[in-house]
Amino acid sequence: MNTITWSEFEAVELRIGTIIRAEEYPEACKPAYKLWVDFGSEIGVKQSSAQITVHYTRDELIGKQIIGVVNFPNKQIGKFMSEFLCTWFYRDYGSVILAIPEREVDDGAKLG
């Protein structure tokens, strides 16, 4: 495990956002959804893809708050441009569980 400094951690913009739209992403190499997440008035709505189809349906994702890294450069994923990194935890067999707040938080709030 690499050690980082406090200032390196502070540079990572981990923010809370609410999923407002989720679509199938059939062109993805692995099963995935396209997500649109509202990160509040300062950041706005950003899009990303996430391989979270094992444990989540599109319908149950709408309105769910997630933690995203919003200051990475955009990344082309197939024909879709990812504008933030959705955070999750890997399970032993490869599926993922979203990193979510225990209680509702204002969209755009920074993880500290």
Image (tube, rainbow, N blue to C red):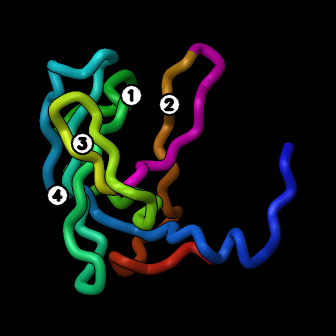
Q: Position of residue 15 (x, y in %)?
A: 45, 70
Measuring 28% from the left and 27% from the top, which residue is drawn there?
32
Numbered label attached to residue 65: none
Instruction: Measure the alpha-carbon separation of dots 1 and 4.
Output: 18 Å
Which residue is under mark 2?
96
Say whether residue 86 is left or right of residue 11.
left
Which of the two discs, 3 and 4, labels the residue nearer the N terminus? Answer: 4
Q: Does the magenta stretch include residue 108?
A: no
Which of discs 3 and 4 lies nearer the camera? The answer is: 4
Q: Quadrant of the C terminus?
A: bottom right
Numbered label attached to residue 55: 1
Residue span colored magenta: 84-93
Which amino acid type is marked by label 4? Ile
Which of the two discs, 1 and 3, labels the residue nearer the N terminus? Answer: 1
Q: Is residue 91 magenta?
A: yes
- Callout 2 touching callout 1 (CB < 8 Å): yes
- Callout 1 touching callout 4 (CB < 8 Å): no
Q: Position of residue 73 (x, y in %)?
A: 39, 57
Which amino acid type is marked by label 2? Val
Q: Give SS at disc 3.
A: helix
Which residue is under mark 4?
20
Q: Which is nearer the eye, 35 or 65?
A: 35
- Callout 2 touching callout 3 (CB < 8 Å): no
Q: Which is nearer the eye, 51 or 13?
A: 13
Q: Residues within 10 Å of mark 1 (few under 14, many from 20)?
A: few
Q: Give SS at disc 4.
A: strand
Q: Residues within 10 Å of mark 2 (few under 14, many from 20)?
A: some
Which residue is under mark 3?
60
